[in-house]
Image (cartoon, coloured by chain):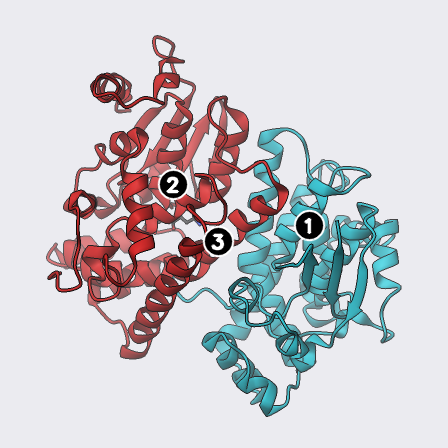
């Protein structure tokens, strides 16, 4: 198996996949790209449909034996299947359902909100030529909105609410557990990856949430996450953002 | 609770197997026992149809609890006690409640015996999940917006306005409340309808390209991606005749017909009550030309 990971700073989806790779003890060539400059769109396989149309938008790409794979939770499931070391998902079908449903909530509700708030605080900046080369029309439109600084008050308020809701769910879930699914899993990785950077940006959501605070520290100190974070080029990788998934437009 | 369509499913199976088709023998399991699975669903369409068809492909007997979406059954207190979000589907397995149709399908595949609906290869499984996400979060909502503007909205619009307003007030999720209001008043902007049509057209091209490379969506075997995709696209040549027909998208049509030919699909779509799902019979036509009227 030949793996090469094109990743950005260890934050958001890049953090999930880097940490999963390390947790599963999989050797891979690591290739740094600047997601915040749209470098993903200059890669030779950027136009392949499963890269160009990835719902996750500016996330990492795993090249596995020549096939370009996207969407961090599903890449992590793949790495969990092919790698060694401790499983990153529970074995019991019901617990696996809980994991997939949890991740779906993060992917669909938390990630778009975090990416919007992150991009507002730390705007990504791509050259016109790069923007022109973006295949997905809706992704290109989101880039333009963000680079022009057009954020609606309604979307900002809704995004903050979604961060609050995610933290509430985590706090509740941790009442009986150390990790979200009992044992350390992809759900911890993906939730941490999107929320770590929200602590300073939506600080009220994390106030008086002792279990969430302890869990954030616990995830951060796992060997896999520590190793992923050590690859950061800037002092605070959780301040690195690029255009994320779309906020639900219907249903 | 309405009793299970088991007897009916069993009967249909007999009819189907008598005709030489097989593969449904696994439905025998569980008959005579009280099934421990209850599915709360609407029509075999979109999210409801995903766990319905997955259960039937696995041969899992289940109590069918039909909720009439157009009668707002999903927002009634009895159902909110099962799923407080007031969305369909939900599945009860023993004491446990499961929601999120795609995650339910993975559960059904893993928790029960019967044919595997996820490929054995890890990369194929990644591709299955990738396509399901595209359909659930990008293509499906665009189909749905069009469907709600042309079918759901007009179906309920003529009812007593006060009754409708009260029904909307009972919806727990604010985004669903907004959606219903929009559907009832028909206030879809030209831009958002245009964007949905753009996505549907592009999604059709992507599906055609994918299915020109593989017999099934995302892998070489029938999987949850196909179940998901069929629920989205079963009436495509009827709803989008200018974009999907035997001339323009031969691979999509081949794929839809192959899925429609499966005994589980027949049994599942037979549970439909509205004209919405009866559109599936378009797939019985041997050739659907580009000139076909909508
Ligand atoms: N992500 C959920 C979505 C469920 C959902 O929104 N279902 C629609 C029907 S396809 C619904 O319940 N609509 C009725 C309403 O919102 O009142 C799933 O896949 O199960």
Q: Is residue A20 left or right of residue B37?
A: right
In this rendering, the answer to whether B83 lies above or below B62 is below
Question: Residue B8, percent across and down?
Answer: 22, 20
Task: Provide the letter of the chain coloured cyan.
Answer: A
Question: Residue B183, percent across and down?
Answer: 24, 62
Q: Is residue B140 left or right of residue B96?
A: left
Residue A194 visible to the viewer? no
Quarter of the figure with the C terminus of chain B: bottom left
Residue at (45%, 45%) from the top-left corner? B225
Give the numbered dot on residue A225. Answer: none
Residue at numbered disc 1: A76
Could you tell me how far apart the alpha carbons at marks 3 and 1 are, in whole angstroms?
16 Å
Task: Please tell me if label 3 and label 1 are on a single chain.
Answer: no
Question: Would you call the spot at circle 2 few (<14 residues within 10 Å), some (14-19), or many (20 or more)?
Answer: many
In this rendering, the answer to whether A219 lies above or below A87 is below
Q: Quadrant of residue A131?
A: bottom right
Give the numbered dot on residue B50. Answer: 2
In this rendering, the answer to whether B291 lies above or below B61 is below
Query: Quick one: SS at disc 1?
Result: helix
């Amino acid at each position: 198996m030949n793996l090469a990971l094109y990743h950005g700073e260890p934050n958001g989806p890049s953090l999930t996949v880097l940490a999963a790779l390390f947790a599963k003890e999989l050797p891979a060539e690591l290739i740094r790209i600047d997601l915040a400059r749209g470098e993903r769109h200059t890669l030779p396989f950027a136009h392949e449909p499963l890269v160009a149309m990835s719902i996750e938008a500016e996330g990492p790409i795993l090249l596995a034996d020549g096939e370009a794979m996207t969407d961090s939770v599903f890449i992590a499931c793949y790495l969990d299947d092919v790698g060694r070391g401790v499983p990153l998902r529970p074995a019991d079908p019901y617990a696996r359902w809980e994991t997939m449903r949890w991740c779906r909530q993060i992917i669909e509700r938390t990630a778009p909100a975090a990416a919007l708030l992150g991009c507002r605080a730390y705007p990504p900046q791509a050259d016109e030529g790069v923007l022109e080369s973006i295949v997905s029309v809706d992704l290109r439109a989101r880039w333009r909105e963000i680079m022009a600084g057009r954020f609606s008050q309604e979307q900002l308020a809704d995004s903050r609410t979604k961060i609050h809701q995610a933290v509430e769910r985590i706090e509740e879930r941790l009442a009986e557990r150390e990790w979200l699914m009992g044992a350390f899993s992809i759900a911890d990785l993906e939730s941490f990856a999107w929320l770590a950077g929200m602590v300073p940006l939506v600080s009220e959501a994390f106030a008086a949430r002792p279990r969430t605070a302890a869990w954030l520290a616990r995830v951060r100190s796992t060997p896999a996450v520590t190793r992923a974070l050590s690859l950061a080029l800037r002092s605070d990788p959780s301040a690195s953002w690029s255009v994320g998934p779309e906020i639900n437009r219907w249903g | 609770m309405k009793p299970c369509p088991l007897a009916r499913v069993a009967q249909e199976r007999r009819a189907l197997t008598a005709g030489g088709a097989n593969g449904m023998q696994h439905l025998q399991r569980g008959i005579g026992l009280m099934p421990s699975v209850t599915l709360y669903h609407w029509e075999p369409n979109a999210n409801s149809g995903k766990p319905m068809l997955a259960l039937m492909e696995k041969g899992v007997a289940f109590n069918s609890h039909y909720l009439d979406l157009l009668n707002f059954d999903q927002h009634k207190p009895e159902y909110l006690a099962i799923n407080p979000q007031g969305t369909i589907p939900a599945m009860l397995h023993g004491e446990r409640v499961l929601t999120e149709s795609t995650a339910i399908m993975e559960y059904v595949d893993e928790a029960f015996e019967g044919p595997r609906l996820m490929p054995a290869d890890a990369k194929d499984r990644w591709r299955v999940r990738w396509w399901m996400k595209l359909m659930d979060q990008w293509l499906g909502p665009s189909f749905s917006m069009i469907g709600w503007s042309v079918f759901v909205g007009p179906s309920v619009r003529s009812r007593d306005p006060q009754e409708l307003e009260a029904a909307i007030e009972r919806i727990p999720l604010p985004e669903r409340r907004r959606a219903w209001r929009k559907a009832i008043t028909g206030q879809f902007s030209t831009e958002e309808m245009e964007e949905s049509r753009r996505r549907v057209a592009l999604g059709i091209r992507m599906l055609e390209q994918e299915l020109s490379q593989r017999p099934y969506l995302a892998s070489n075997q029938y999987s949850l991606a196909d179940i998901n995709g069929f629920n989205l696209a079963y009436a495509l040549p009827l709803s989008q005749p200018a974009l999907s027909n035997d001339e323009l998208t031969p691979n999509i049509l081949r794929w839809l017909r192959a899925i429609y030919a499966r005994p589980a699909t027949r049994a599942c779509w037979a549970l439909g009550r509205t004209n919405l799902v009866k559109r599936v019979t378009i797939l019985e036509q041997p050739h659907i030309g580009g000139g076909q009227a909508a």
